[in-house]
Amino acid sequence: MHKMLSSVVLTCFVVMCYVSVSYADDAHGFVEPESWTVGDLDSTYQEWDVLLYAQGNIPDVGYITNGPITSDPTLSALPPGFHSGSNNFYSFAGDYGIECVIYNHGGTSGSGSYGPADGTRVLIQTAATMNMDPGAGGPASVFIDTLRIVDEEGIPVSGGSFEDAIRIEELWLGEVPGGHGNPVWQQELLWEFYLPGYTDDFTILADVIVHSSFKQMRVDTLIMPAICPGDANCDGAINWRDIDYLVAGMNDNLDAWENMFLPGTPSCNFANCDVDADGSVNWRDIDPFVELMNTTCP
């Protein structure tokens, strides 16, 4: 039995960049990363909309990395999934898989040199139509509990399982035109992960329900130091010295938090301020911060 979201009832200056002249049409609710910007150092962005083949689709909406990566990411359908005439993935015969290969800055195609304290933040977004039939496992599009991250040998990456996700959200749910002019429900989902100590290439795998049209996918990554919830001033400990820095970052105020380190720059991640790991820095982080007082980072 798959888990489903409770709401489901109804200027390019970077080293490498290519973006298509047409923009993505299928997704309605895709979002930008909250903790970084596309084109930041050690980041990647790749997005697919028009899927021309069952196997090996390269990003058509855009692909941006900073610094250089010499291989292109790919998106494929796994049997019994196939390429449909509407340039999506589909299956009549049963649930099918998707496979998305991501090349990271610390992998064989990247040029970065990273240490064991570095890890990768991964933001994954999908758009697919829904199969509403409970007998088939619906209502569902991508089964949220099947999405996982593995290495090039298929071994699960630490931090990359459904249970490890920093957040999982339904971004959009609504009716869109379907075949023969009949409306269908489309669901757009988001998963966010942190892969501690991992900067290599990886593959995203997920299962899609039968009779669901998989339409669009976006993946953003950023290599960053390990997250230590509560260590807002980046000194390796959680104590009274972090309070002013945490207050500066309230309401996701990244600029104010970074200004606390002037004339230098922070050596840790703004995500340290998101103590409750809900994707936002706000008053909800205060109680978890108090509980961590007078502890140190792992």
Image (cartoon, helix red, strand yellow):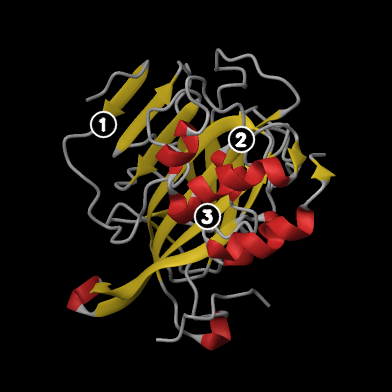
In this rendering, position of residue 41 left or right of residue 135:
left
Residue 254 x/y as whole percent: 44, 42
Q: Earlier in the sequence, mark 1 or mark 3?
A: 1
In this rendering, position of residue 120 left or right of residue 98:
right
Given this view, does label 1 or label 2 mark the residue nearer the observer? Answer: 2
Residue drawn at x 36%, y 19% is 16
Mark 1 residue type = Val
Locate residue 146: give its quadrant: bottom right
Kindly identify which residue carries mark 2.
Answer: 120
Residue drawn at x 39%, y 34% is 58
Mark 3 falls on what kind of element? loop
Given this view, does label 3 or label 2 mark the residue nearer the observer? Answer: 3
Mark 2 falls on what kind of element? strand
Label 2 CA crowd tier, 10 Å (few <14, some 14–19, many 20+): many
Kindly identify which residue carries mark 1.
Answer: 19
Viewer-nearest residue: 230 or 178: 230
Marks 1/3 in contact by CB < 8 Å: the verdict is no
Kindly identify which residue carries mark 3.
Answer: 281
Mark 3 residue type = Val
Given this view, does label 1 or label 3 mark the residue nearer the observer? Answer: 3
Residue 284 x/y as whole percent: 58, 65
